[in-house]
Image: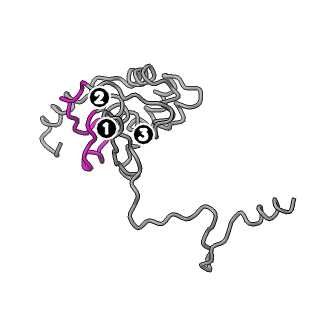
Amino acid sequence: MGRGTLCDMQQHLINHPLNGIKLPDLVQTLVDCYGWDILAAQININCFKSNPSVASSVTFLRKTDWARHRLEAFYLYRFRQFPLPSEIQHALPPREREVDISQNDRPPAALTLDDPEFFDDPNTGWQPTPKDGMRARHTRKQVVGATVPQPDSVASSSGKKTDPWSKWRAKQNDD
């Protein structure tokens, strides 16, 4: 959806799959389908992990935009299985994205605790890889040219690699 007239934007919002769904109903629908454990593993928000309840989750989600956006994106792209957004649409919050509502007859994705966490953040990458022909897994894109420090060594100010755990390992070997 480009930036159009106010009438175009209102028409888009009327047809949006999240229009008319209240946050408590959204959370309850996802809990009924997946349970708290899978929601905690997929969305990785603390309100789904420690003493979860619909009321406490809704309170947190209303105060925290990023968490509500993750939940709404999970609802759209995993639960309802709408096609993934373009890079431009992905920069918008889920409620403002264009969604092809003609493809709303898919059943919810079957998820387990072993499935990877759902990512809906353009900074971490958005690369769907098909699995079982029905759903997409989301993995982080590797940034070209990025170097990742090795966990067992760290470069010091002199340029030499030093082991930050060397004193501890030496002490363990002495004992």
| The residue stretch that appears in magenta | 82-105
Q: Is residue 63 left or right of residue 104?
A: right
Residue 88: x percent and y percent?
24, 49
Q: CB atoms at circles 2 and 1 under 8 Å apart? A: yes
Q: Which mark is residue 94?
A: 1
Which of 156 and 7 lies nearest the eye of the viewer?
A: 156
Decide: few, some or many residues near mark 1? Use Cα within 10 Å; few <14, some 14-19, many ≥20: many
Tell me the quadrant of the picture where the C terminus can be found: bottom right
Tell me if mark 3 has few (under 14), some (14-19) or many (20+) residues whose alpha carbon lies within 10 angstroms of its own. Answer: many
- Circle 3 residue: 118
N-terminal of the pair, mark 2 or mark 3, is 2
The answer for how far apart the CA atoms under marks 1 and 3 are is 14 Å
Q: Is residue 108 left or right of residue 168?
A: left
Amino acid identity at mark 3: Phe
User: Three-letter amino acid code at disc 2?
Assistant: Leu
Which mark is first along the chain, 3 or 1?
1
Name the element at disc 2.
loop
Q: Residue at x 38, y 24 (%)?
A: 26
The kind of residue tagged 1 is Pro
* Residue at mark 2 to residue at mark 1: CA–CA distance: 9 Å
Q: Which residue is disc 2 drawn over?
A: 18
* Residue 91 place in picture, x, y as percent: 30, 48
Q: Of helix, strand and loop, which one carries label 3?
A: loop
Which structural element holds mark 1? helix
Judged by depth in the image, the label closer to the viewer, 1 or 3, is 3
Q: Is residue 165 above or below residue 137?
A: below
Q: Position of residue 85 (x, y in %)?
A: 26, 42
Q: CA distance from mark 2 to mark 3?
A: 19 Å
Residue 43 position (above or below residue 157): above
